[in-house]
Amino acid sequence: MNAIAIGVPASSKQRQPSRFELRFQSLFHSGKALIFPCDENGSVFLDLLSDKARANYLFARAVVGHEYANPVVLASD
């Protein structure tokens, strides 16, 4: 599977650990997904994302139904 885990910087993970992830599965490439740390409601910590991760998150949200499926909240490992 080619999921891309896009998360918070290591220093931020220590401040606010996430037990959940928001997963955007590609509609065209099985095994490809964008994954972001979130809370149990699927809220992503935008202030803690890197600029690139934030851009990817906003892109994934914008193309739901075209490039990516509706996101799902999963418990992280």
Image (tube, rainbow, N blue to C red):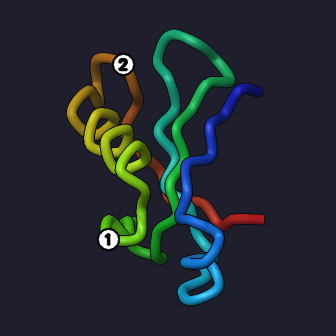
Residue beneath label 1, please?
47
Q: CA distance from mark 1 to mark 2?
A: 25 Å
Amino acid tagged 1 = Asp
Instruction: For label 1, count other residues whose C-alpha is less than 10 Å away and answer few (under 14), some (14-19) or many (20+).
Output: few
Q: At x 46% / y 18%, what residue is drawn?
A: 27
User: Which of 37 and 28 lies nearest the eye of the viewer?
Assistant: 37
Q: Position of residue 32 (x, y in %)?
A: 61, 24
Secondary structure of the residue carrying tag 2 is loop
Amino acid tagged 2 = Glu
User: Which of 6 and 25 lies nearest the eye of the viewer?
Assistant: 6
Please identify the residue farthest to the left as the structure is shown: 62
Q: From the viewer's perspective, is 74 left or right of 73?
A: right
Q: At x 50% / y 54%, what residue is drawn?
A: 36
Q: From the viewer's perspective, is 71 left or right of 10?
A: left
Q: Taking 31 as reference, is 38 above or below it?
A: below
Q: Position of residue 55 (x, y in %)?
A: 31, 41
Q: The N terminus lies in which quarter of the figure?
A: top right
Residue beneath label 2, please?
67
Q: Position of residue 52 (x, y in %)?
A: 40, 43
Q: At x 28% / y 17%, what residue is drawn?
A: 66
Q: From the viewer's perspective, is 41 left or right of 2?
A: left
Give whichever of discs 1 and 2 has the lower sequence position: 1
